[in-house]
Amino acid sequence: MRTGIFFCQVEENNRLNIAAVAKYAANLPNVETVQELGIQPRLDAKDLAGQVHSGNLERIVIAGDMPGYFKPVFTKAMALAGHDPLEVRLASFREHGASGSTTLERAKAIVVCAAFGVPFALAVEPAETPVQPTTLIIGAGIAGIQAALEIADAGKPVCLVERFGTIGGHMAMFDKTFPTLDCSACILTPKMVSVAQHEMIRLLTNSEVIALSGSPGSYRVQIKCKARMVDVDACVACNICSEVCPVEVASEFDAGIARRKAVYIPFPQAVPNAYLVDAENCLYVQSAGKKCGACLKKCPKECIDLTQKDEIIEIEVGNIIIATGYDVLRAENIEHYGYGILPNVLTALEFERLTNASGPTGGKIVTKSLKLNKRTKLEEWVFDANGPAPKSIAIIHCVGSRDQNYNSYCSRVCCMYSLKFAHLVKEKLPGADCYEFYIDMRAFGKGYEEFFERIKHEGTFVIRGRTAAISELNGQMMVTGEDIIQDKLIQFPVDMVLLAVGLIPAHGTEELSHMLGLTRDEDGWFSELNYNGRPMDTEKGCIYVAGMCQSPKDIPDVVAQASAVAAGVLSSISSGKGIGHRGSVTLSEIEARAKNLQAK
Amino acid sequence: MAIRVNPKIIDDLEGYGAEDVQLCYHCGNCSAVCPHADEFNVFPRRPMRYLQMGLERKLETSLEPWLCYYCGQCSDQCPRGAEPGETMMSLRRWLISRYDITGIARLFFKSTKVELAAVIIVALLTGIFFLGFGLWQGDINVYDGSNAFLPSSFIHNFDLALGFLVALFIGLSAFRFWWFSMGGKSAVPIPWWLYIKKAYLLPWHFFTQKRFADCEKETTRRIYLPWLAHLGLMLGYVIMLFIVMVFVKQLQAGPEINWSVHVFGYLASLGLLIGVVYMLRGRLKKNRTQYQRSHGSDWIFLVLLFIIALTGVTQHILHRSGLLLAANIVYIVHLMVVVPWLLRMPFTKWAHMFLRPLGMYFSAVRNEALAKQKSGIETTVPARKVA
């Protein structure tokens, strides 16, 4: 077919050398004419029809970042010239991902496929590879647990790696889920126990992936199993070691609002249900056996070994699922909210632990009270179950989200969990006033809008407007903001402020992305292959993303994505064929394939 | 009453400097951080809303832009980069062009080239006129006394004529300002005695710029330098304007220094130079939010003022050191800059020198009128309760 290739751009693209692509395109077989029309060219269908006629062009390729923009005029030109208007092909650089280090090669490949009239996706499909049956899952939050159970229930082996001492992730910390107000632990803990008991799941807690080699379908992974120093099988979680341990540090599981010992169990329902030693804070470990050792003497099962060393194991896996989750933004960075200075300004995770029945106050919502710390002889603000209950609580949405100074994206779950907090406050403290400061209420899911209506009817003050500042006036916290609907400035006293802080990728995400060779988007989340069509695949073969590590999402979406990933993994195992790295196909291979496909 | 909407106003304002108004999603952060926003003047968000909705009439009658000294806190904390502070600044420019009946202000704000061309033409005309006049009636080697190149009595009359012209246009703008915000176009009836009760605020705001200092009242690290520089600059040229208008004869006499007049001249020159250098430096380094974007007219104002101060001081020094030819030449240059600079005053941002204190005075009057109107029906519920 006699082909004419026209390069048209909608806007400037400095990363792509159009001239080089055009030069390359001119040497393709059957290419009659190559024209660089520049940015936003004035196109006239009659002129183009004349060109089609004089060159006797049977096919037109429009190449550019958004070639579809120019398609109507070319179609018209083909029709005017009496040629087949369906033979206007698009070579879309943006759609087919001509970006990054391989931009030029990719753009050339896209033009070749269009010139041959072959779908690009067919020509670049990477070669299939045989797949090992074992699956590695990094991160054992709800996403990792769900995917692990799906795969293991299908009879395939899973290795589940978790950095923390217990599985469960953030969901284990929550009190209730929105909008159904189900008890979070009641949904999660049975799944956690299933993971522990499953014969197809190898559970590695307190462990981290440190190196990856091999190719899709048979990766070799090095995992560092940090010394737990407590024998998981022998420990009966009797708590005697914790009682005698003299060290106290902030508890990660309680989001820092309670304290734990250096030998501890993250929470009573932890899986594996065994204690572990925090080597960084253990006096015995830090002094190389010269100090303390109290737990060693008291343990009735003699299952503590403080001399245990970290261990590095190597396993071979076929597929890898990343489910590393998220962290919350550091609220102390946002100075005007006073977090870290004013004692009763809490982040969302802290409030989750406060209101949780297994939290430090047994689920009572109280304000912090001053207590003397016997060790440091200093007065500290701590939560005490007998402390005073707040009379008014302000909940501030979009803290660090949708804000170009922090995260420009919406963290997606904050509106709903803030509404949930309002409900919990009203449920536990019916007399307390609760104020929600929001910018836009993003109640997007099933039953969410109804939940919002319910919260309003429960008597929560819902104020459209962002709080600008939290200050202290004579020992009383004041919130300042604007009520947009009433067009009024407001300032009033509150006893407690909850910050609906935005979400950021979990720490270590960057290192992991380098290790696995994955790209991340501008906000730091792992990039998926195709947002609509393949939201859990990555450009690396046999590596998948599930849950929050791809983008913020709520629990139902996380679970759905985790199951979808499991389906992809299982299909690759049962067919024995995995997909290689995308982008691994070279330009000459694509040319050859395009020729073959055209011949068919 | 029908509300007339002008959807183009937001595009129109781009020419005055506000480019990002459309980004605003109305979180209210800016109004809440603004130290000057009060019960009746909830800004900058409200004017941002008016702009987005094209409520030209509401903007014309609003006093809020005049209450802002552009400390930049709103822009710093804006989550959208919508630049509310810059918008207030641009609205002041736009309002000046609205108050101006000649249409020159609009022309100048819209095109810096036009303004620059006008300044150059007036400067050249002034230069030719004074050079011709000087050569025709005097001796270029004589600075003062009989046969002077530019006799001080003539300059005095010239100053007064120029001052009258400027005062006329400023007065017209001020009247229209009153008419739009308080008079015919205003929806709030204002008792006349409130104007008298609050009259003291006019000189108070004019001479102290107290509200500029108030910009810092809620911040932890208070920076008073911009206020002091602004005040120094303003007092500098008010004093200078006054002594040039009234005492130009004594100013030009010499060569011995007449301390009773000259001391004010020295102080004013010092204030002018320090203020101008501080502002030029800020705008060049862009070290604070309010200096990030400079409109062409800001540059023209500062650069011309710098030249004026410099040539003024130079001719004074040259005259005292006996270099009379050089002093006369520098004098011509000085006049070439002073005349266009004074003439453009009513049509540029410079008008804010009078209009801003006026706006603050009007606002105080209007606030009290509104408070009286509202008292009794006002409730203090902080938020809407849906039940």
Image (spheres, rainbow, N blue to C red):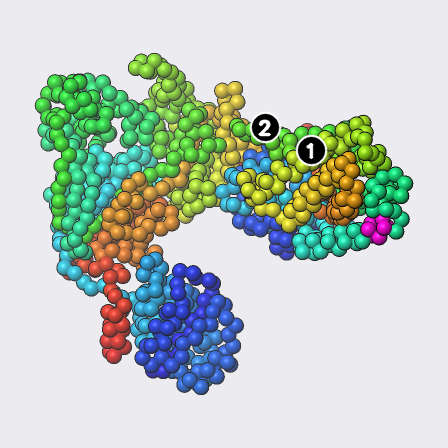
Q: How far apart are the two marked residues, 2 and 1, measured between alpha carbons?
A: 28 Å
Name which residue lies at 40% across and 60% down: A15
Chain-order first, disc 2 or disc 1: 2
Q: Could you tell me which secondary element the residue under label 2 belongs to?
A: loop
Name which residue lies at 54% across and 46% down: B82
Residue A67 - label? none
Q: Is residue A202 above or below residue A306?
A: below
**In the rendered image, which quarter is residue A531 located in?**
bottom left
Residue at numbered disc 2: B217
Q: Is residue A95 left or right of residue A152?
A: right
Q: Residues within 10 Å of mark 2 (few under 14, many from 20)?
A: some
Residues in magenta, as a range: B129-135
Chain of the residue that carries numbered disc 1 in the rendered image? B
Chain of the residue that carries numbered disc 2 in the rendered image? B
Where is residue A407? Give x, y as percent: 42, 43
Q: Residues within 10 Å of mark 1 (few under 14, many from 20)?
A: some
Query: Is A421 a magenta residue?
Result: no
- Residue A108 versus residue B378: which sits nearer the camera? A108
Q: Please, what is the dominant secondary structure of the magenta stretch?
A: helix
Residue at numbered disc 1: B270
Q: Is residue B108 above or below residue A334?
A: below
